[in-house]
Image (cartoon, rainbow, N blue to C red):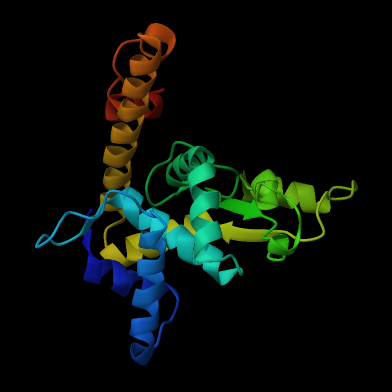
Amino acid sequence: MRLTYRGLEDLLAEMHDVAPQNRVALQGRIKHFQRNGWPGGTNTGKGKAASYDFGAVLKLCLGFELLQIGVTPERAAKLLKKNWYNIRTATSLAINAHPELTTLVKDDNGGFDVFLFCDPKSLSSLTDAEEDPTDDTFFYTSAPEMARQLTDSKRLEWRRLALINLTIVLDSIAHYSGDFAGLRTAYLDWDDAERAADDEEYKAEFGVYPRDHGPRVDIEAAIRRREHD
């Protein structure tokens, strides 16, 4: 799955109910993210159309979700960059728990939604904090675990908590493309490339692959083995 710039713009407009007369403002927000290096790797040079793979589309979709809860583009880009490993993990959980895509992980209800959460702390610019305090609250959880925490007798740690339903974000991308299975394939291709890049970066620094297992195994084969088990 790859989107052109126009396709990406149409997707975001659909997700956020942007009126036609406000498309210029939407374009401005996309450019604002790009000026902050989010997502990276989409500037293909003069005369070449930008192309957005699964990862780039997800990065901008999540950036706009943070805009919706009051986080500025600059902060959103930094937060997502810093927490990208956790977001990748959450995305894997969401893809694998989605009943339309796979049956690897299910609860008694036939699947579960995965959420990103944080305290936006939109007044953090008024504090003396050197680091963004939202970093300390940014993580992911499943719907069953969130329900358990909300009904637990123990007091929650934060006065505020913003939730982003990552499963519905992925649903929105899939609905736009009209191909749920294609989204899963696009995710697997992207995840495989991300993990392979992680392995090569590790090897470049330490001289061996992680756990010295050699190059990354084929993810589709691993998933087929899990499904068979």
Name above or below for residue 203 compared with residue 108: above
Number of numbered tags placed on the structure image: 0
Q: Hey, which residue is sitting farthest bottom in the picture?
A: 21
Percent position (x, y) of residue 118?
A: 66, 54
Answer yes or no: is residue 171 visible: no
Percent position (x, y) of residue 105?
A: 50, 38
Residue sitting at x 41%, y 83%: 18
**Image quadrant in which you'd find residue 42:** bottom left
Percent position (x, y) of residue 90?
A: 51, 43
Q: In the shown orientation, is residue 20 left or right of residue 162?
A: left
Answer yes or no: is residue 192 visible: yes
Q: In the shown orientation, is residue 198 left or right of residue 167?
A: left
Q: Hey, which residue is sitting farthest left in the picture?
A: 47
Q: In the shown orientation, is residue 118 left or right of residue 74?
A: right
Quadrant in which the C terminus appears: top left
Percent position (x, y) of residue 186?
A: 27, 46
Residue sitting at x 45%, y 40%: 92
Name above or below for residue 199 compared with residue 169: above
214 or 73, nearer to the observer: 73
148 or 37, nearer to the observer: 37
Residue sitting at x 73%, y 52%: 147
Name above or below for residue 35 compared with residue 201: below
Residue sitting at x 31%, y 72%: 9
